[in-house]
Amino acid sequence: MEIRSKAFKSNSRIALEDANLQRALGNLKAGFPSKRAAAIARLPEFDALRDQARDLKNHILEHLDLYLEEFEKNVTTNGGTVHWCRSAEDARKTILQICQQQDAKTVTKGKSMVSEEIALNEYLEANGVTPVETDLGEYILQLRNDHPSHIVAPAIHLTLDDVSTAFHEHHKRPKSDDPAVLMQEAREVLRTKFVAADVGITGANFLIAETGSTIICTNEGNGDLTQTLPKTHIVVSSIEKVVPTLEDMTLFLRLLARSATGQEFTVYNTLSTGPRRRSDQDGPENFHVVLVDNGRSDMVGTEFQEMLRCIRCSACMNHCPVYGAVGGHTYGWVYPGPMGSVLTPQMVGIENAGLLPNASTFCGKCEEVCPVRIPLPKLMRHWRDKEYEKHLSPASVRWGLGTWSFFARRPSLYRWLSRGSNLFLRLVGGKRGRISKLPLAGGWTDFRDLPAPSGKTFMQQWQERKQ
Amino acid sequence: MANPHPRVGLFVTCLADMFRPEVAFASVKLLEMAGFEVEVPERQTCCGQPAFNSGDRADAAAIARQTIEAFDGFEYVVGPSGSCIGMLHHYPELFAKDDPWYQRAQTLKARAFEITSFLAVHLDLDKLSSSFSGKVTYHDSCSGLRELGIKKQPRILLSKIPGVQICEMEEAETCCGFGGTFCVKYPDISNRMVGNKSDNIRATGADTLLGGDLGCLLNMAGKLKREGIDVKARHIVEVLADMAQIPAIGESDRGA
């Protein structure tokens, strides 16, 4: 996927003007956060579980190699194969190779953000394999040649009318705006694809080391058909999703659904443990797990390690006032919102994504709701440190900051600067006590008045009183 | 035996110094009411947050050292801003653990308090007396709320003022869009956020908006004024110190 994060500002202006998008974002804001709050209110130990989950993830990250190797060993014992892929390209090639070995024409896909991260669909198509998204949201996006704007609700930016138009154009059926009819239509179209697919690709919410299992948590059941009907099941997952035991997995499941959608549990929680055994009624003949690193192991041992605790619940973006104003596409790559503002610079380079970690007021809401207590503002600030170190911040910002800090480090000069600015602003403010237009401060005064100082500086008055 | 009048160093904050000196005077008045001897160290400037949040750690650390020195020897450091005091609490992050400044930063952090949380503990609340009367709504500024746990304290203090009727707004804990340099770096998004805020403020029917951080208050007051919404914005200490006779933020008693 093309990286458009450098256009964050112009993207955001377009998004703010987009009435459809704003309506959709309004629904998101009204929906997920209140459902999450209600679900948490019903679980008094929620915060204690968050602490446990944070500590467990920290432990896993300290022993990531160990748990991944245990996972691989158990997948192999079960008759499956693990593929280690350092880069997105390695992962794409590996998946294509498996598809080609099966002589696959079409593959069905469950929802997977990692497959978006490695731009899998475009690659498969270019190489003669047709991917079919089976998650309803992803399916709609595929028809529209669009990308997810949210990691849990990928088509959140679309309206019902967008969906019925896309269905009408592609399914050649009468246009309907009844969600139940549209759902049925998608079911009918997708059912034949499920049966025809040679390979099924899903993501994984967790990898369980002790059993060599993978699990997907969904609400539609499409993932189950994707992974049980075709002859070959490929799980594409990033490395930090490994957990030691099934018991540990349940801790995260309790946090995941509540944090994401406010459900106690997602509707389908489907474990895959190797290919079909003799005694099994169904299941794939071949089971592959493609483990994607793509910059993650570089984060281990750095100030960004804590980001690897992320379980992709989307609570940070659901509660983020910036995401809520501009939506996910504005961020210009796969992962939007606060978690994306930390991950994207790691994966595409800070020089391509510097605007993302800056697009935060550091209000801290994301950290407040994170089920694994990732200090997202701190991590975004670390990216700002990197940006500054590498002289990537805009010259105007560096100059302004340099001048300001020159004064801030010299108290007596700072006093004079404050006095001068204070006097200037009082003069401009005049009798109204506020300023409607100020040169070089258009960012402020285009949208709001600037209250003028109510008197001389405090330091000036304090001195005068003391004398 | 403890000093009968422990010394408090007032951290004025740039915005109070520059835009709203009454906020600092009100703070002095309230701290004296609580029995403290208040001093204003001259070597203080800004807390350094603009540098810290822009990735300029060297300047942030230089400013931190200056602030630590300026407030050496005070039992407490108190300021009328959750954001700036929150920044003082970040100071240890600027130094390596074996740097002597790290320990000094920790010591400052342990002594640094935002004013409403400080007063809620140290002030005999029966001493509060204010002629203020009105329907107020309170904006919880992000840094105070999430970094320092300030939520109940301002409301406890306001509950002691007989004329105050609190009407909570929807999304009182949602950011107003100020965010320091954010509001000028991303003006369109900031505008949307402060627009949502002013809608929520208006919907309460309150005549006064109170808060504990001048950055947010200047932002919200400026938006309310621009939209012609007749809600007066004030820092909470103005009401607590019975100084709410002065013109509200962005207003003037000189006509126009």
Image: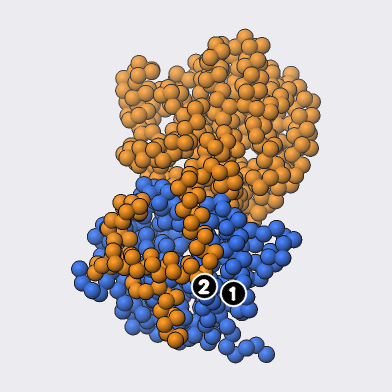
Q: Are marks 1 and 2 on the same chain?
A: yes
Whether residue B150 is visible here, answered yes or no, is no
Residue at 35% in and 37% down: A14
Q: Nearer the viewer, residue B60 or B92?
A: B60
Residue at 48% in and 44% down: A394
Q: Is residue B199 left or right of residue A388?
A: left
Q: Amino acid at mark 1?
A: Phe
Q: Is residue A287 left or right of residue A19?
A: right
What is the quadrant of residue A24 in the picture? top left
Q: Colour of chain A?
A: orange
Mark 1 vs 2: CB contact within 8 A: yes
Label 1: which residue?
B71
Image coordinates for residue B173, horizontal then vertical, percent? 45, 59
Chain letter of the residue carrying label 1: B
Q: Colour of chain B?
A: blue
Chain letter of the residue carrying label 2: B
User: Spatial distance from mark 1 to mark 2, Cα to Cα?
Assistant: 9 Å
Label 2: which residue?
B11
